Amino acid sequence: MVRFFYFFCIISLLLNFGCEPKETPKFIPDGLYLVKKIDTIKTPLRPLLLNEKAIFFNKMFDEYNDQNYNRIIIDTTQYVQLDLEGDPKTEQDEESKKRLLLSLSKNASASLKIFSVKYLMKKVVLVIDGEALTIHKIKEPLTSGLLQITRCNDNACEKLSLVLKDNVKND
């Protein structure tokens, strides 16, 4: 009986050898999330709450990461899903910088209104494919369904526009 047990254990190990552990994907929908904490240096990560997720900047946007943010802890309880009505549009502002305009769907617009009132004067992060692209401060309630990303550096607006066109589903 003992031999059978050892034989069974060895067979089980051999069959499972090389198999990757089955993990549930930690998928975060594309959207706008509340920033709970920003680390600028690598520090040990404290245990996260169930509604928190640690994300990092997309490497494509590292050059625009002026603050040298390392890890961003976001709150996943409430977010604004990026459902666009059309392609993002870029415009010149008065200081020769560009801004990116995103027109949200009706459902996303309603979520944005509630979200922006609740988190007025708080930092939020735009997340695509589980990575941070840009961080912003909500300066006023956003009630029109139009999300404006201002102060784009050099080609940041064009890069962001391309990423959004390629990765965000339009209604």
Image (tube, rainbow, N blue to C red):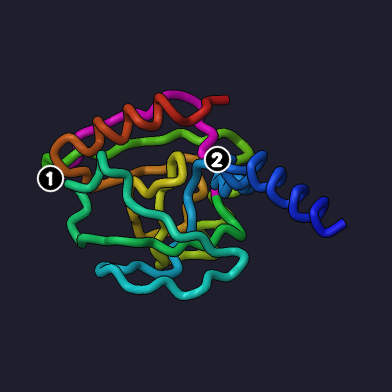
Residue 93, position as x, y percentages in the image = 19, 40
**Label 2, residues with CA under 10 Å away: few <14, some 14-19, many ≥20:** few
Asked whether residue 51 appears in the rendered view, the answer is yes
Instruction: Tell whether position 81 is magenta.
Output: yes
> Which stretch appears magenta?
80-93
**Residue under numbered circle 2:** 18
Q: CA distance from mark 2 to mark 1?
A: 57 Å
Q: Which amino acid is tagged 1? A: Glu
Is 161 on the left or on the right of 20, as rendered?
A: left
Q: Which amino acid is tagged 2? A: Gly
In this view, which residue lies farthest toward the right?
1
Q: Which mark is residue 41?
A: none
Q: Residue at x 32, y 44 (%)?
A: 58
Under circle 1, the secondary element is: loop
Instruction: Tell whether position 147 is magenta.
Output: no
Residue 13, position as x, y percentages in the image = 65, 47
Looking at the rendered image, the quarter that the C terminus falls into is top right
Residue 160, position as x, y percentages in the image = 31, 35
